[in-house]
Amino acid sequence: MEEPSDARNGVTVLVLSDPGLCTVRARSVAERFEQELTHLYGAATVHVRTQFLGISDADTLEFGTIATLREDYESVDVVLILTEMPRRSHGKPEMARIFPDESAAALSYPTLGVHAGRRRLLALFMSCVLRLVDGAPPEARERYEPRWNRWQEPRGDEPGYLLAHTITGVPRTVLGMVATNAPWRTAPHLSTALAAAAATGAFGVFYQSIWQMSAALSPSRLLMIGVLAITLMVLWLILSNGLWERAEHTDPTEVFLYYNLSTVLTLSLVVLGLYLALFVVILAASLVVIDPDFMTQIMGSPVDFSNYVDIAWLSAALGVVAGGLGTSFDETADLRQLTQGRREMQRRPEPEQHGGR
């Protein structure tokens, strides 16, 4: 453990965070983090810097880059790396890993889950610093010890690490990855699909056969049609954009399962949002365009609001299928960057990227 020249008189921490949600969360706790450190060490300075760090062929962070970044500051005692990359160790998601020789720690933000509160992130920050810098009161480490799990102390050449909970770790990590994917960012890249889906779904407002078909289908069958439409579009987006990750070798650090699950969930949320938006638009249009008396004549029985709902639901399903299967995306590369696996490829050395991970 490396101790600053006078730990009791102050400590300086540099937080290097991935762009996006990691940086937002790091900055949200920076002030409180500085206060907690000041309470323990007498004085503290926290720098938060957005930095997209590379990884080596050995799946480790490029510490040469980190050392260069430290030189931009007068004095840095600890470097905390907050990344969106998930990692596995001993069959579980790895929340944090300590590198004493570099006075650094790497923290995986997705392992904190979807609603990674400030208190949880702050506790993890503090716990890492207390393992890298001496000078704090003896009881401080226990105070900030994570309640959800215990640190594994360094053994030989293996640094200390903190693993996620055995039961909740994987689902929490996958959902956290979905949050860092920011599904709402995908909408602008699906404008062509949305236009095609809206054009196809509009036919349901004017074609009487769709009115009759929706009335003949049971609610459960209509629900199944909606689920099928969403599934088809998600599959199309994954296959047409090459978003499914394949492992080329077995390695305990590989997290392809996490990547693929988060990709499927992210795109499912996007397509579900598209479906519901179409449903609302078509429902509003049908209420305006279709006269109830005219629909009653066509259907041969009294109609009510549920008939309009059925028409909108079936039409939206047809629109989603048409928009997903019949549309190509002009910004394929940008769409790929919205998934974890593709963003990690950007961190790797050039030959590794061409080899495909």
Image: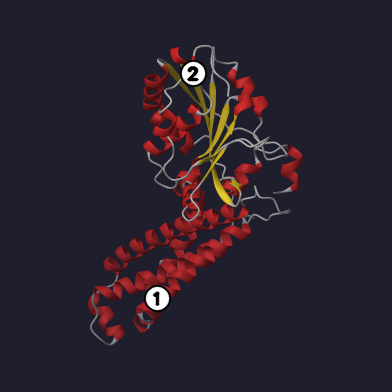
Please indicate, yes or no, whether residue 196 appears anywhere in the rendered image: yes
Q: Residue at x 60, y 21 (%)?
A: 69
State the residue position of label 1: 222
Please indicate, yes or no, whether residue 339 appears anywhere in the rendered image: no
Residue 156 screen position, x and y as percent = 67, 35
78 w.r.t. 161: above or below: above
Mark 2, Cα crowd under 10 Å, few <14 / some 14-19 / many 20+, is many
State the residue position of label 2: 12
Asked whether, in this view, residue 85 is left or right of residue 113, the answer is right
**Amino acid marked by disc 1:** Leu
Asked whether, in this view, residue 283 is left or right of residue 192, the answer is left
Front label number (2 vs 1): 2
Q: How is the image coloured?
A: secondary structure
**Label 2: element kind:** strand
Q: Quadrant of the N terminus?
A: top right
**Amino acid marked by disc 2:** Thr
Residue 311 screen position, x and y as percent = 35, 73
Residue 84 screen position, x and y as percent = 53, 41
Asked whether, in this view, residue 178 is left or right of residue 285, the answer is right
Q: Return the residue nearer the eye: 48 or 112.
A: 112
Mark 1, Cα crowd under 10 Å, few <14 / some 14-19 / many 20+, is some
For the image shown, how many numbered marks are present on the structure?
2
Q: Residue at x 46, y 66 (%)?
A: 319
184 w.r.t. 300: above or below: above
Q: Residue at x 53, y 63 (%)?
A: 233
Distance (Cα) linking label 2 and label 1: 59 Å
Question: Does the CB distance between marks 2 and 1 fall below 8 Å?
Answer: no
Mark sitting on residue 285: none
Residue 180 screen position, x and y as percent = 49, 44
